[in-house]
């Protein structure tokens, strides 16, 4: 079967998107068949803080999508400041008589990696294999069918707080949706935005959402680093609110209408106007620039700490609603020291216009993700109804097939 029906829910801090589509991961396209959106209540910085409000918002998005997500396996995006990630390695002896590495053995390595010690109340969300070492031979991307006795798997581990994951799943579950997998949001956005060439070269995806800025970097087709920074578009708006002494909603409107993070380009006698009142345009821009610099400097630090900053010839790709602020790409280019472009979802067939905005990168990416994973690893019997306990199997094998 070339294409398949896939479903996703992006539970964002400012909006929930329920999406249904058709995807062909082999040829690399998706077609959005239906999409529903609702304002998000009950979330703060990417995590559910009010189950009832969040459930109502999710239900509204599902309704707006035509209700078709009920009763089908759905992929749900996860983010939030409770997410952390790191690289690790595990080694096992392959005891099979002919030394051949089987899928079962790789799964054993993944299970071993999942046993990594985490903080209290933390749980592994993703184990993404990066490379393998077979009897001292480095750099093996795809070990299946190769011979090796002592096998090391290098993997990227993403973990999150059990309660936050449980709250997210409860809010979605309350709407009668079966969650088949949980996927780290920047990984989904990467699927929608990044070019294969860039992933091969080295590239950073930076999704500036409402509550958080999510990062994922890829080098030589491998996921090397993920991070969540607890600053997003809402922080920009509340800064304007404090600075200009206006309510959040007014500040948000001002930002959407006149927002620019390059304050030196803004005329210092110009004024912006809302509800009959005038504010200094340069001052507003200075407030935004201060926040933009902060989030980009955190991003730079995060890349530096992961030792990937100088390994990204493909540059940075900005997405998420926050990336729309004028001048964000120019400022990112300066602070990160690499070429930077904005991106909305790519390779969308059919009527793509409604999703051609950076706010929908995660939602569209969930569809790619669903198709890709299903193709790579046929699900075992009963796997459609994956419970909370087994969401940890989410990504396996995704990047291996690239
Ligand atoms: N044209 C624009 N200029 C500046 N900011 C914008 C623009 N359009 C949207 N935004 C901001 O983008 C943010 C929402 O982005 P997005 O929809 O990607 O977030 P989300 O997915 O709901 O949140 P998160 O991913 O953090 O959970 C809001 O803060 C909004 O004000
Ligand atoms: Mg988002």
Image: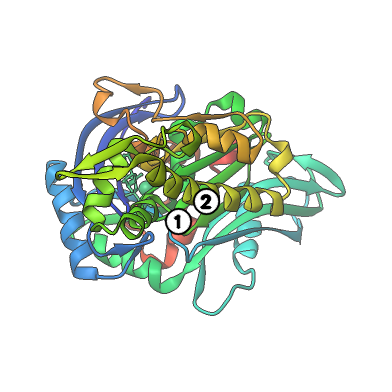
Q: Is residue 42 above or below residue 265?
A: below
Taking depth in this image into account, of 131 and 165 the one nearest to the observer is 165
Q: Position of residue 114 (x, y in %)?
A: 59, 64
Residue 319 quadrant: top left
Q: Which sits earlier in the primary sequence, circle 2 or circle 1?
A: 1
Quickly name the residue at label 1.
231
Cα–Cα span, label 2 and label 1: 7 Å
Q: Residue at x 22, y 60 (%)?
A: 41
Ligand 1, what quadrant? Answer: top left
Whether ligand 1 has any atom under 8 Å from the Cβ at mark 2 is answered as no
Residue 138 quadrant: top right
Quadrant including the N terminus: top left
Q: Residue at x 27, y 51 (%)?
A: 251
Residue 101 in view of the camera: no
Taking depth in this image into account, of 282 and 370 the one nearest to the observer is 282
Quickly name the residue at label 2.
295
Cβ atoms under marks 2 and 1 closer than 8 Å:
yes
Q: Residue at x 76, y 60 (%)?
A: 91
Q: Is residue 364 above or below residue 350?
A: below
Whether ligand 1 has any atom under 8 Å from the Cβ at mark 1 is answered as no
Quadrant including the C terminus: top right
Q: Is residue 145 above or below residue 44?
A: above
Q: Residue furthest right?
A: 136
Colour mapping = rainbow
Q: Position of residue 78 (x, y in %)?
A: 40, 56
Instruction: Look at the numbered disc 2 and give the secondary structure of its residue.
Output: helix
Q: Residues within 10 Å of mark 2 (few under 14, many from 20)?
A: many
Q: Position of residue 15 (x, y in %)?
A: 26, 49
Residue 153 left/right relative to 373: right
Q: Position of residue 367 (x, y in %)?
A: 36, 38
């Amino acid at each position: 079967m070339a294409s398949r029906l896939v479903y996703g829910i992006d539970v964002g801090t400012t909006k929930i998107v329920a999406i249904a589509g058709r995807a062909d991961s082999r040829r690399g396209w998706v077609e959005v068949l239906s999409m529903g959106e609702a304002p998000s209540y009950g979330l703060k910085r990417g995590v559910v803080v009010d189950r009832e409000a969040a459930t109502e918002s999710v239900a509204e998005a599902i309704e707006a999508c035509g209700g078709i997500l009920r009763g089908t396996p759905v992929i749900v995006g996860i983010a939030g400041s409770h997410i952390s990630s790191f690289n690790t390695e595990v080694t096992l002896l392959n005891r099979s008589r002919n030394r051949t590495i089987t899928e079962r053995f790789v799964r054993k390595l993944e299970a071993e990696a999942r046993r990594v010690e985490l903080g209290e109340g933390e749980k592994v969300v993703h184990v993404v294999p990066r490379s393998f070492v077979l009897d001292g031979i480095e750099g093996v991307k795809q070990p299946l069918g190769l011979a090796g006795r002592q096998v090391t798997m290098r993997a990227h581990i993403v973990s999150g707080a059990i309660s936050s994951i449980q709250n997210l799943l409860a809010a979605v579950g309350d709407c009668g949706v079966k969650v088949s997998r949980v996927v780290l949001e920047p990984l989904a956005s990467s699927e929608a935005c990044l070019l294969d060439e860039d992933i091969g070269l080295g590239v950073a995806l930076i999704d500036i959402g409402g509550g958080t800025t999510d990062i994922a970097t890829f080098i030589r087709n491998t996921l090397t680093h993920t991070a969540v920074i607890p600053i997003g578009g809402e922080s920009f708006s509340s800064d304007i609110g404090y600075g200009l002494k206006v309510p959040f909603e007014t500040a948000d409107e001002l930002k959407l209408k006149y927002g620019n993070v390059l304050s030196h380009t803004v005329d210092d006698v110009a004024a912006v106007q809302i509800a009959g009142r005038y504010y200094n345009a340069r001052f507003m821009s200075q407030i935004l620039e201060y926040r933009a610099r902060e989030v980009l400097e955190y991003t730079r630090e995060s890349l530096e700490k992961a030792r990937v900053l100088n390994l990204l010839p493909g540059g940075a790709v900005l997405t998420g609603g926050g990336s729309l602020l004028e001048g964000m790409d120019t400022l990112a280019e300066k602070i990160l020291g690499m070429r930077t472009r904005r991106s909305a979802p790519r390779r969308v067939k059919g009527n793509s216009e409604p999703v051609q905005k950076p706010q929908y990168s995660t939602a569209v990416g969930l569809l790619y993700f669903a198709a890709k994973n299903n193709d790579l690893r046929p699900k075992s019997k009963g796997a459609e109804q994956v419970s909370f306990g087994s969401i940890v199997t989410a990504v396996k094998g995704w990047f291996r097939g690239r």
